[in-house]
Amino acid sequence: MNTVLITGANRGIGLEFCYQYGQQGWKVIACCRQPEQATELNKLAEHMSLQIHEMDVMNRNGIDALANELQHVSIDLLIANAGIYGEKPGHALGNLAYTDWADTLETNVLGVVKVVEAFLPHLRRSEMARIVALSSQMGSIEDNSSGGNLLYRSSKAALNAVMKSVAIDLTAEQIGVLIFHPGWVKTDMGGVNALIDAKTSVAGMVRQIQRFTMPQTGQFIKYDGTQLPW
C-alpha cells in the first residue's frame, strides 16, 4: 500500500487530496493544526485508511516530533498543502503589516521546507518518492501584470525558487518534485467566486502526479499540466 502525507488536510484542497487518495486505497497521513476540530476529516477516517496527526507548520519542534514518531514509516508522496493568504484589507505599499508578512513567509516557505527536510528520511525509504508543493500563479514574476498582494506573491515566488533548488538537489536520489498552481479554487481561501471546485483541481493534480517522470522534476505547472512561467 502506498503512503501519502498531506499537510493542511482538514479542509479545502488538503481534505480533497485525503479523500481522493483514500478512495484509491492509499494509506493517508493527514496533518492539521487542530485534529479534534477537523470534523470532515474525522468522518473520512471512519471509511478509509487515514491517520490524523497534529501539525502546525510554524512549529518546527512539533514537525520534528511527528517525524520522529513516524520514523519507521515509508512515505511515497508528500503533499505540502498547508498555507495562508496573509493579505488583509488595507495591505498596500505605505500600509504594510510586517508581522503578517513574516507569518506568511514562515508558513508558506519555511514551513514547507521544514516539512520536506524532516520527512526526507521517510521519502528515501520509498522506491518512487515524490514531493508536491502547492504554490500559486501569483508567485510568477513574469505573469504579474496587476501588482499588489505583496505578502502572498512574495511567499509563493520564494517557495517556487526554493522548491526548484530542492528538485535539483534531489534529482540524483530520484526523488521528484512538482510545483503546482491548483487553479482559482472555491475554498475558504479562494472564495465563492473562484472558477473551479476542489474536486476538479485535485483530480487534475492527481493525474499529473501519476503521469510524472523524473525529467519533469522542478517544473511549475497548473493542475491540468500546463506549464507556467517563473
Image (cartoon, grey):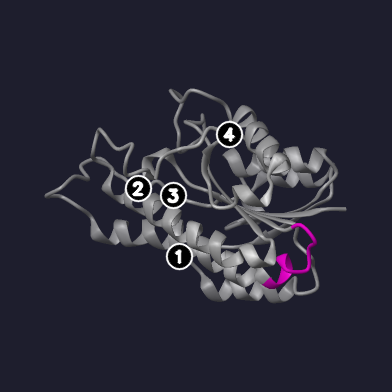
Q: CA distance from mark 3 to mark 2?
A: 8 Å
The dominant secondary structure in magenta is loop
Marks 1 and 2 in Cβ contact (< 8 Å): no
Query: Amino acid under label 4?
Result: Gly
Which of label 3 and label 1 is nearer to you? 1
- Say whether disc 3 or disc 4 marks the residue closer to the N-terminus: 3
Task: Work out how far the residue at label 3 is from the one at label 4, CA to CA, in angstroms.
Answer: 24 Å
Between disc 3 and disc 4, the foreground one is: 4
Q: Amino acid at mark 3?
A: Ile
Q: Earlier in the sequence, mark 1 or mark 4?
A: 1
Residue interval drawn in magenta:
121-128
Q: Residue at x 32, y 62 (%)?
A: 102
The amino acid sitting under disc 2 is: Tyr
Reading the image, the residue beneath label 1 is 110
Q: Residue sitting at 75 percent across and 70 percent down?
A: 70
Would you call the spot at circle 3 few (<14 residues within 10 Å), some (14-19), or many (20 or more)? Answer: some
Which of pointers 3 and 1 lies earlier in the amino acid sequence? 3
Quadrant placement of the C terminus: top left
Q: Are marks 4 and 2 in contact (CB under 8 Å)?
A: no
Residue 184 shows in this picture:
yes
Which one is in front in this view, the residue at disc 4 or the one at disc 2? 4
Q: Say if mark 1 contacts mark 4, CB within 8 Å.
A: no
Q: Which residue is mark 2?
A: 152
